[in-house]
Image (spheres, helix red, strand yellow):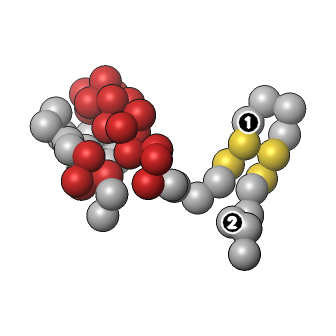
């Protein structure tokens, strides 16, 4: 079964894939200062192992 996708001309939303982990960790670390008030799991040492949980 294929996972659902929501598509528009500007964006595609889909479930997280294991192959997203590296890029997600980079984005998390770059954004930690601005998102930590809303995402308490976000921290400067966020790891690929945490992303894959």
What is the secondary structure assignment of the residue under circle 2? loop
What is the secondary structure assignment of the residue under circle 1? loop
Viewer-nearest of labels 1 and 2? 2
Please provide percent x and percent y for residue 13.
Answer: 67, 48
In the rendered image, the quadrant that contains the N terminus is: bottom right
- Residue 11's disc is 1
Q: Residue at x 20, y 44 (%)?
A: 47
Q: Is residue 27 left or right of residue 6?
A: left
Q: Is residue 7 left or right of residue 48?
A: right
- Residue 33's disc is none
Q: Earlier in the sequence, mark 1 or mark 2?
A: 2
Residue 28 vs residue 22, the one in the foreground: 22
Please provide percent x and percent y for residue 42.
Answer: 25, 44
Q: Is residue 15 left or right of residue 45?
A: right
Quarter-of-image position of residue 24: top left
- Residue 3's disc is 2
Please provide percent x and percent y for residue 45.
Answer: 13, 37
Q: Is residue 52 visible?
A: yes
Please provide percent x and percent y for residue 51.
Answer: 31, 52
Residue 20 vs residue 43, the one in the foreground: 20
Q: Residue at x 26, y 30 (%)?
A: 29
């Amino acid at each position: 079964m294929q996972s659902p996708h929501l598509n528009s001309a500007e964006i595609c939303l889909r479930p997280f894939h294991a192959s997203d982990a590296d890029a997600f960790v980079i984005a998390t670390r770059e954004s930690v200062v601005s998102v930590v008030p809303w995402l308490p799991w976000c921290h400067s040492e966020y790891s690929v192992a945490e992303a894959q949980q």
